[in-house]
Image (spheres, helix red, strand yellow):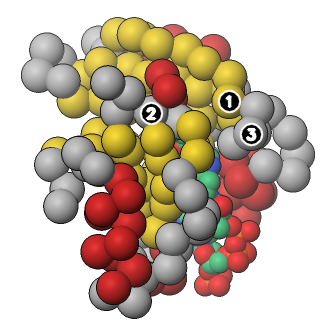
Amino acid sequence: KALRIDHVGIAVPDLDAAIIFYENVFGMRCVHRETNDEQGVREAMLAVGEGGDRLQLLAPLRPDSAIAKFLDRSGPGVQQLAYTVANIDETSATLRSHGLRLLYDQPKRGTADSRINFVHPKDAGGVLVELVEPAR
Ligand code: V0V
């Protein structure tokens, strides 16, 4: 089951400009930055207040990446909604038993060495749902 919202992911063309915007306008704090070559993204995690809520800014690393494709089609905006799960293998099995397609057969590496997978947006009401099992 989903334990909490892990983060909301927003596709942006310019990561540095977006960090400055969210810090200056909404008072968020950039707490982590990372390049994920496999996912084709440069990303930043922003803390919203002190309660653990997080916004993830995602900028494309390559023109053929998922984020580049999203920006081409839809422009900047909300690209994904991520839930924290305790055990991504169990959650994936449950979702598959409900007939949902997961994008990867096995979880891949996400932010800060988490394990991640995605539910196809067509199987989740038009929302790209990410599952995140945090690193121990
Ligand atoms: C595409 N569609 C979306 C969507 N992307 N709908 C909602 N939200 C999105 N983000 C729609 C699209 O408009 C099409 O609808 C339909 O899905 C199928 O599109 P497609 O052309 O077949 O597929 P693509 O090539 O657009 O790819 C979509 C998927 C791709 C979701 C398969 O983006 C993907 O593999 N995403 C997972 C990886 C990812 O997003 N990585 C970047 C974040 P119509 O037109 O048919 O109605 S990395 C990350 O989050 C990390 C590292 C982390 O959190 O730790």
20 lies above or below 75? above
Q: Is the residue marked by circle 2 packed among few (<14), some (14-19), or many (20+) residues within 10 Å?
A: some
Which amino acid type is marked by label 1?
A: Asn
Asked if disc 1 is less than 8 Å from ligand 1, the answer is yes
Give the farthest residue toward the left: 51
Compared across the picture, whether 66 is left or right of 62 comes to left
Q: Is the residue marked by circle 3 packed among few (<14), some (14-19), or many (20+) residues within 10 Å?
A: few
Q: Which residue is rendered at x = 87% and y = 52% of the image?
A: 64
Q: Is the residue marked by circle 1 packed among few (<14), some (14-19), or many (20+) residues within 10 Å?
A: some
The answer, for residue 121, to whether it is visible in the render is: yes
Compared across the picture, whether 66 is left or right of 21 comes to right
Q: Which residue is mark 1?
A: 36
Point out residue 110 in the picture as x, y percentages from the top left corner: 53, 36
Give the farthest residue toward the right: 63
Real-space Cα separation, disc 3 to disc 2, in angstroms: 14 Å
Q: How many marks?
A: 3
Which amino acid type is marked by label 2?
A: Ser
Asked if disc 2 is less than 8 Å from ligand 1, the answer is yes
Q: Which residue is rendered at x = 86% and y = 39% of the image?
A: 62
Which image quadrant for residue 43?
A: top right
Q: Nearer the viewer, residue 130 or 87?
A: 87
Quarter of the image where the C terminus is located: top left
Which amino acid type is marked by label 3?
A: Glu
- Ligand 1: give its quadrant: bottom right
Q: Which residue is mark 2?
A: 114
